[in-house]
Each structure stands twice: as C-alpha cells, then as structure tokens.
Image: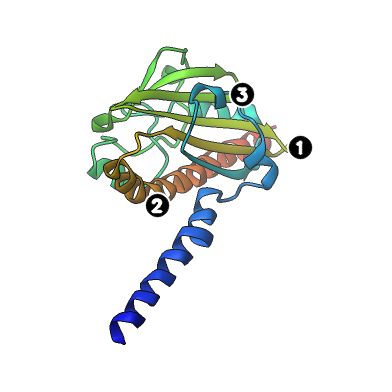
Amino acid sequence: MMGVLVGVGLAGVVLVYWYPVRRWYRHWGATAAEIARPMPGDSEVSGAAYETTLAITINAPPYAIWPWLLQMGYRRGGLYSYDWLDRVFGFLDAPSAERILPEFQQLRVGDVVSVGRGGGFPVRIVDPCSALVLGGESGGAGWLWQLGLYPANSRQTRLVSRNQARLPRTVGWALFMCLLEPAAFIMTRRMLLGLKSRAEAVAAMGQRAA
C-alpha cells in the first residue's frame, strides 16, 4: 500500500511539474500574442522540438536597449545574469558591464559571441534596434536564440527572448534537456532583469540630463 501511495505521489509531482510549472517557466512574462508571433529567425531552425519565449517590459526605447545586446559575451559586456554562477562555470571571467562599452558596439552576421568555456554563439541576424539572432549546430542538434525589441509605446519596449532547438531523438538528449530547461530559465530570466535595470538606469540619467 505504501508503495502505491508513493508512486501516486511521484506521479502527481511529475504532472504538476510537466504541465503548469514547466509551461509557466517556458513562457515567463510573455503574452499569448508574443508566444504566437513569428520572429525573424524562426525559419532558421526547422522542426524545432524545443521552444521557449520569455519577455519583459523595459521602461526605455529600443535604441537605449540595443547597445547592451550588442556588447554581450565573454570578455565583452558579460551576460547580465548571475555573474557568480557564470564565472564558476567559466562562461565569464569578470562581472557584467554596468555601462555601455563603445569598443563592443560592432556586431555583424558571421561574428561569434564568445561565452568562455561554453563555446560561442554565431551571429545569424543583426537588425539594429529590432532583432539579434544567434544560432548554430553541434552534435547533431541545431539551436537558435533570438532577442527581439518591440516598442510598446514611446517610452516602453518589450524585450522578447526566444530559444529554439532541433534535437536528436535519444534518451541522452531527453535527459540533458530535462536538466537544461530549468537552469536556462533561471539564467535567462535573470539576464532579462539585468538588461532591464541597466537600460532603465541609463535612460533615466538621459532624461534628467535633458
């Protein structure tokens, strides 16, 4: 009897995680329209088996957010997430920047945004003040990371982060994604919040100066 109760309890935990919890963190902050809306790089990964769309409102126009996206990366502006974790795992070697770095404001298709021991993110699309798309192929898997800027009004912008992946149908990849999904959510959510705080601080300084 005890074994049955334990089994039922574990099944309940799995169902709660797989449906409401997993759905929540895969679409954190995003509206139904944002989840459904096509983004510039969607066609770059055909047959994606994994997709997340996260979003946040930033009280700044797109042109005030774009420089922070351009300078992301190892030995550049950082990743704006939990720096101590990124440094432990070798993705960064210094804290993320708190200011716009003029020397890292050039990014072109074909460039690679380094993330330390994590390799690099090849640049696929650069649409100034609108979209930055990074993506690549590795070990039979294809992946894409899109960052889109959508004006909400003259003073606010929606920053949308979409991750997509085409994965081999193996047990190993399935287990890997089970571990990666929550970790990726935690780090990406913190990155969006880090971008928000930085862009809003600079925008507020500009408004006071004006």
Residue 92 lies, with reference to residue 41, above or below; the image says: below
Residue at horizontal 41%, vertical 12%? 110
Residue 129's tag is 3
Considering depth in this image, is 68 or 185 the residue closer to the camera?
185
The answer to whether one can see residue 70 in this image is no
Q: How crowded is mark 2: few (under 14 residues within 10 Å), some or many (20 or more)?
A: some
Residue 1 in percent (x, y) is at: 31, 87
The secondary structure type at the circle numbered 2 is: helix
The residue wearing badge 1 is 153
For the residues labelled 1 and 3, the Cα–Cα distance comes to: 15 Å
Q: What residue type is labelled 2?
A: Pro
The amino acid type, in three-letter code, at marker 1 is: Asn
Of 24 and 168, nearer the camera is: 168
Q: Is residue 121 left or right of residue 109?
A: left
Q: Mark 2 points at which residue?
A: 182
**Whether residue 104 is situated above or below residue 80 in the rendered picture:** above
**Quadrant of residue 150 within the rendered picture:** top right
Q: Which of marks 1 and 3 is nearer the N terminus?
A: 3
